[in-house]
Amino acid sequence: MLSSLPLLAADHRAGIVYEIDDAHRRVAVADVWLAEHAGILRLPSLPSGAPDRWAFADDRGGALVVAGADAVRRIPVAIPAEHLACDPSGRYVVVTTGLGMNEEPWSDLVSVVDLATDSSVRFRVRTGEPGVVVVPDQSSGAPMIVLRHREPGALESLPLSDALATGPHAPVLRGALLDDLAPDGHGDVVDPSTGILGVATSRGLERFVVHGGLPRAIGVVPWPAAGRAYYLRLAGDTGRVTGIVRGGPSDPGAWPEWTNTFVEIDLATGASAAVPLPPGLAFRFALGTGTAAVSVIHPAGDTVVVVDRESSRISRTVPIPPMSHPPLPGRMPWDAVDGRAAQRRAIAIDPQSSTIAVTSGGDGAIHLIDADDGISTVVLDTPLDEGGHLLWADGGERIDDLVGR
């Protein structure tokens, strides 16, 4: 059973977003194409006025879609959206651009949205697929936009105030550059209370701060398991970085043999904990207070693995119904198969009841797993190709992760 909190379910390939709870199943936003890689950003409440709950980039309409207490609004941004992040106040959202349907990087536009005025500005940076976070400067406390560049790897810091003062015609804006970063960065996280930024690379969790406007490295934490992480989240209950370290064969077609380890790392001290997971395809995961849930896809059967983060062990492993068109061994799991979308799963945890929701990509189904491992299923009028996206609306808990997921 669902709680009274609405579950947001987005089919980014069909252009529709649903809100689902125990009593209703309604279309929250129609004709909107969520930027899958940038994901959904849960927003802190503004100091005054009705709180905004979530935001994402419409990758066809060219807008940041923002949901408030009783309305959905759209603010123009550059697309295709690659990453999005907000400042700790929740007022400003930064959106970077990526490849979209193109094979080579071509867009150099970054947008900054002011949610208090429903306005946006755009400026040009280095062409690529930049990650983004907003961090406080260690010396002044001023908010700084930090862009993570790839090939070659670099961090670039720009004052948020400079970005907001950008004039028309998308001018070039350059910031202070640090080029001692691995060129394969993928996955960014920031602790707003300390201003420490973490980047996932092949070296490990590379950590930085901005001091006097300049990005400065403060050390690398090696991954506590063989492989590397690609996707990071900040856990609101502990303030630690969480991720899944993938190891095993480098051949993408050998994904059933990939190893997976859930890791939790203290950004300030580098202390870490690791929990081995079953082999297969595991990527995005869900966080709850003291817990995490991971969907693992494998030809022998898909499972949801629940991690007790307080004891660093697996507490439950729940088999779930197979997808009708799962990824196939010997083929890259994120590529289309025989003209069909590559299918995978999205996952979320209800902050009130601890119910776990996990999608069945291509089947339009959301499986709900209760505390006793009972499974019920909600079927939508959309296939949820590529697994879609899930987000449980704000349950009143503290929001610390300021990057789209």
Image (cartoon, rainbow, N blue to C red):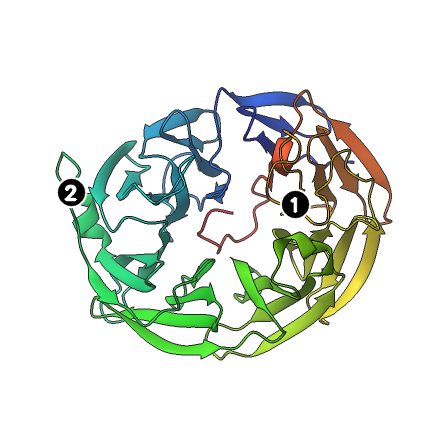
In-image side of 136 versus 386 (left or right): left
What's under tag 2, amino acid-wise?
A: Thr
Viewer-closest of 185 and 110: 185
Point out residue 42 in the picture as x, y percentages from the top left corner: 49, 44
The location of residue 301, given as percent across then percent down, is: 83, 48
Up the image or down, 348 lies above or below 280; here it is above
Q: Residues within 10 Å of mark 2 (few under 14, many from 20)?
A: some
- x and y, in percent, of residue 195 in the image: 37, 66
Q: CA distance from mark 2 to mark 1?
A: 37 Å
Task: Look at 36% across and 40% down and name the residue there.
Answer: 48
Reading the image, the residue beneath label 1 is 348
- Residue 200 is at least partly visible in this image: yes
Mark 1 residue type = Ala
Q: Is 142 situated left or right of 258 in this image?
A: left
Query: In the displayed structure, would residue 210 be above or below residue 219?
Result: above
Disc marking residue 166: 2
Which of 266/177 is in front? 177
Judge the density around disc 1: few (<14), some (14-19), many (≥20) Cα neighbours within 10 Å: many
Image quarter for residue 359? Answer: top right
